[in-house]
């Protein structure tokens, strides 16, 4: 019983010291934020969200159309089928003769839709391979593999350096530059034989967007901790103070007058009195984090809806010309496939340029300690940074294994979760174009309906989620995650009519976008302060760096079977494994581990094994510890 009592008394000390340690006064990352910085943070997301959605929709469709057109140049020509690639053959009339395909049999005929060809019939290349023997649909699938590997490489070697100097802000600036100017370059690549160059620009934009997003996410716990509402609760706790009869309690929950065993008991009693105020600070920080995590993407999808309306006007005005140009033609005909799509992509780039750079002006750098090496040549500097980043990534994994195994479970679950779900999302456009011959107008409807559905879903869920803490929030996440098993099964076994792709976008759009904000909120509530850059970098690695496995599985099935359906169905296995791992996660234990890390329980003489990962400089860290 005495031992149990000691544990009960020690726990408030851990919690109090944990919250007090968050309030290090000389930590520049914890400079109080204001409305201008919060609006700037939102504005950056408003600029980056449309280009991210444009890349996996309009840009993926453009590359697929380019590659499909090149495949249609094969001598086998094209064939017309009802609704989808495996539908019944269709026939029309070519020069008075029934025809269901266009190849060398009609060399004198400039291709148009044959007379009498039903509107439900779509054209597909008979031989789907490009010159190098790869299925044309694999152009985007393999581009996704390259993107995900590129993101993983960046985050493993450089992603954890966000808390050095102003690299967190610089990462956002570099990402903004790429996602703004690459779409402008894409506008001028109009020949279908240059589909590989479009794919290169596509990869560059998606890598820049996803990597910058990790730097953006690393601001979340800092803004939640320094938010005006959190600061108000913290200041109220400071002003009220906590006093005992003949002694005062310092801000870190330690009694300045007690000593020995009596001091420990006094500390525990004093900390017990302070726990409610510390708990109120912690709860407010968690509520603000959930609000930021949901409101930011909601604004992003609202911004996307506005951009899609502008893109829709362009695509509709170009639709008649694009529809004509999307059909295979004789050599010598104008080669201008997807003019409307290219302008739509450029619009998203210009929007990102305005919003992201305006957001960067108001977003504080929140500088951390300087890089641990001096002035070097650029090549030597990048090599040193890569080595440092890689070491810190491995050190973060070691830290989770040693001090927070529950967070490690969350990371592993996220790997399998995003591998399956991410592959379905990034391959959706290619799938519907290949199977249902979705065109530009279909894509406008998909993106517009999807963005509106996502915005509405996030806004409806936000007031619910911000009031959920601990297990309740995690149960809701698990329920939404279980629903995502439906997506690959529906795609693989259904999708024989075009209405199905719109229905899935409406349902999935309302639920899918909430998963990442929820995992961010859960992660923020269990991530120890001071380790945000390294921890969120590892979360980013787990979110995007392994999705290439799902895309590679899809590419293998496509090459082996000639159909995307089996590869899509295989993604359900990743989701099943993710749910099994997530089910073993203990939220309460993860928060206890966080409190122990923040309180310095694992340190020896004020020095911890993983102190290199902390955001504070060495001097300020030692100063804050010595003062206690």
Image (cartoon, grey):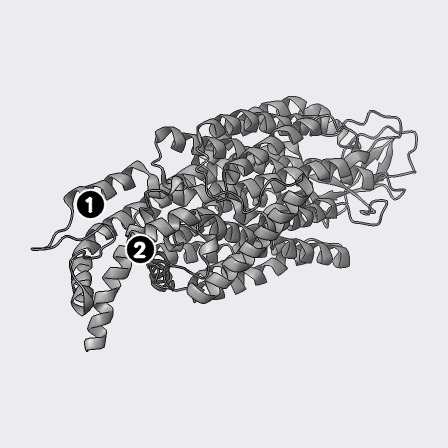
Residue sitting nearer the eye, 99 or 13: 13
Residue hosting label 2: 18
| Element class at badge 1 | helix
| Element class at badge 2 | helix
The quadrant of the picture occupied by the N terminus is bottom left
Asked whether disc 1 touches disc 2, contact meaning CB atoms under 8 Å apart, the reply is no
- The answer to whether residue 490 shows anywhere in this view is no
Q: Position of residue 206 (x, y in %)?
A: 62, 40
Residue in view at x 40 percent, y 41 percent = 29
Structural distance between the alpha carbons of marks 1 and 2 = 15 Å
Taking 321 as reference, is 620 left or right? left
Q: Residues within 10 Å of mark 2 (few under 14, many from 20)?
A: many
Residue hosting label 1: 237
The quadrant of the picture occupied by the C terminus is bottom left
Residue most extreme to the bottom: 1
Q: Position of residue 223 (x, y in %)?
A: 38, 40
């Amino acid at each position: 019983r005495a031992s149990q009592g000691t544990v009960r008394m020690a726990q408030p000390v851990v919690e109090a010291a944990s919250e007090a340690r968050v309030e290090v006064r000389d930590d520049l990352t914890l400079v109080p934020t204001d409305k201008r910085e919060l609006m700037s943070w939102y504005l950056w997301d408003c600029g980056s969200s449309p280009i991210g959605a444009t890349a996996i929709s309009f840009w993926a469709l453009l590359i697929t159309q380019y590659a499909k057109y090149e495949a249609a140049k094969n001598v086998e020509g094209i064939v017309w089928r009802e609704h989808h690639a495996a539908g019944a053959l269709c026939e029309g009339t070519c020069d008075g003769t029934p025809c269901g395909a266009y190849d060398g049999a009609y060399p004198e005929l400039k291709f148009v839709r044959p007379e009498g060809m039903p509107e439900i019939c779509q054209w597909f290349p008979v031989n789907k391979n490009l010159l190098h023997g790869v299925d044309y649909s694999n152009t985007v699938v393999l581009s996704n593999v390259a993107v995900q590997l590129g993101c993983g490489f960046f985050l493993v070697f450089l992603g954890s350096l966000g808390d050095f100097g102003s690299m967190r802000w610089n990462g956002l600036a570099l990402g903004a530059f790429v996602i703004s100017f690459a779409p402008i370059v894409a506008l001028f690549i109009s020949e279908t034989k240059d589909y590989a160059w479009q794919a290169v620009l596509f990869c560059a934009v998606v890598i820049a967007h996803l990597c910058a997003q990790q730097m953006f996410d690393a601001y979340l716990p800092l803004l939640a901790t320094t938010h005006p509402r959190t600061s108000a609760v913290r200041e109220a706790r400071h002003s009220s103070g906590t006093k005992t009869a003949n002694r005062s309690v310092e801000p870190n929950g330690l009694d300045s007058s007690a000593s020995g065993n009596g001091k420990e008991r006094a500390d525990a009693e004093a900390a017990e009195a302070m726990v409610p105020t510390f708990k109120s600070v912690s709860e407010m920080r968690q509520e603000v984090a959930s609000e930021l995590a949901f409101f930011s993407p909601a604004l992003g999808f609202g911004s996307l809806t506005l951009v899609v309306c502008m893109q829709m006007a362009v695509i509709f005005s170009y639709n008649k010309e694009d529809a004509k140009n999307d059909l295979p033609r004789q050599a010598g005909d104008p080669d201008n496939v997807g003019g409307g799509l290219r302008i739509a992509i450029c619009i998203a780039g210009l929007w990102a340029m305005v919003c992201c750079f305006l957001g960067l002006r108001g977003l504080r750098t929140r500088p951390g300690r300087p890089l641990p090496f001096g002035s070097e040549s650029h090549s030597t500097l990048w090599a040193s940074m890569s080595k440092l980043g890689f070491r810190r990534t491995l050190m973060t994994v070691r830290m989770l294994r040693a001090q927070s195994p529950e967070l490690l479970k969350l990371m592993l679950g996220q790997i399998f979760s995003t591998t399956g779900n991410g592959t379905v999302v990034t391959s959706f456009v290619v799938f519907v174009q290949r199977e249902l011959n979705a065109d530009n107008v279909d894509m406008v409807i998909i993106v517009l309906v999807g963005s509106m559905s996502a915005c509405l879903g996030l806004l409806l869920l936000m007031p619910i989620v911000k009031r959920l803490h601990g297990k309740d929030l995690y149960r809701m996440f698990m329920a939404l995650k279980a629903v995502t098993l439906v997506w690959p099964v529906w795609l693989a076994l259904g999708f024989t009519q075009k209405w199905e792709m719109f229905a899935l976008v409406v349902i999935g759009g309302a639920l899918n976008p909430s998963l990442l904000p929820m995992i961010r909120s859960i992660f923020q509530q269990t991530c120890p302060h001071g380790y945000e850059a390294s921890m969120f970098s590892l979360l980013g690695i787990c979110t995007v760096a392994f999705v290439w496995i799902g895309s590679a599985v899809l590419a293998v099935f496509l090459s082996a079977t000639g159909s995307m359906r089996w590869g899509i169905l295989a993604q359900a296995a990743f989701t099943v494994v993710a749910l099994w791992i997530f089910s073993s996660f203990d939220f309460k234990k993860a928060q206890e581990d966080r409190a122990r890390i923040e309180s310095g329980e694992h340190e020896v003489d004020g020095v911890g094994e993983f102190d290199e990962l902390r955001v504070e400089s060495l001097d300020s860290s030692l100063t804050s510890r010595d003062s206690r």
